[in-house]
Amino acid sequence: MFLRIDHVGIACHDLEEKIAFYESTFGLTVVSREVNEEQGVKEAMLHVAEGEGGASYVQLLEPLSPETAVGKFLAKRGEGVHHIGYGVADVTRALQEIAGKGVRLIDSRPRHGSMGAAIAFLHPKDVGGVLTELVEAPRRSS
Ligand code: MC0
């Protein structure tokens, strides 16, 4: 079902500060910045690697307010890994396959994610404490 790790989402208090850290320490490059009101985040994608199944990224996440998912996470746990996003070919089909296997779907239908992706989250309590995201990247034009 999983094609690759699409991204690792990392919660932080200060997006610009963390971008500067990842750029200067690891030489990563920002390829996208977005504000996603629905998800309550300001985020940046930093390119890590290119594989057969597509690219992988570090995603830095700053909450838009304390009441958001990332805001609550930061208050409870502090900065760190917030979720893992796995690349899938078809997020709707992946949700259908997972439904009924005892894993709560936070999103029963795909939502809008970073860089035009269709995304859906699975509940961390049913995935060993790991907030898990399915990511269907937009088709690449060749
Ligand atoms: C919360 N919990 C987590 C967690 N967030 N566990 C692991 N990883 C996380 N990221 C745990 C809490 O510690 C708590 O456990 C329990 O789940 C309930 O948490 P809560 O603080 O009471 O919050 P809820 O229940 O209101 O919401 C948690 C839930 C929510 C995971 C359902 O955060 C959610 O819907 N997340 C999906 C959307 C999201 O995260 N969006 C932001 C990234 P205890 O043991 O204390 O009860 S958007 C994004 O990344 C997009 C832009 C993209 O990738 O393109």
Image: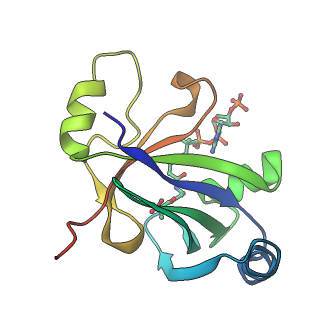
- Can you tell me which quadrant of the image ligand 1 is in? top right
Toward the front, the furthest residue is 52
Q: Residue at x 80, y 46 (%)?
A: 76
Residue 60: name its quadrant: bottom right
What percent of the width, then of the height, locates residue 140?
22, 71
Task: Return the residue nearer the eye: 73 or 97.
Answer: 97
What percent of the width, then of the height, locates residue 102?
39, 15
Task: Return the residue nearer the eye: 3 or 138.
Answer: 3
Q: Residue at x 38, y 64 (%)?
A: 113
Q: Is residue 87 above or below residue 113?
A: above
What percent of the width, then of the height, locates residue 28?
66, 75
Q: Is residue 53 above or below residue 42?
A: above
- Report the quarter where the C terminus lies: bottom left
Q: Residue at x 77, y 76 (%)?
A: 14
Q: Is residue 28 left or right of residue 74?
A: left
- Indicate the colouring scheme: rainbow
Q: Is residue 129 above or below residue 61?
A: above
Q: Residue at x 62, y 73 (%)?
A: 64
Task: Return the residue nearer the eye: 90 or 69.
Answer: 90
Task: Return the residue nearer the eye: 40 or 88.
Answer: 88
What percent of the width, then of the height, locates residue 129?
64, 29
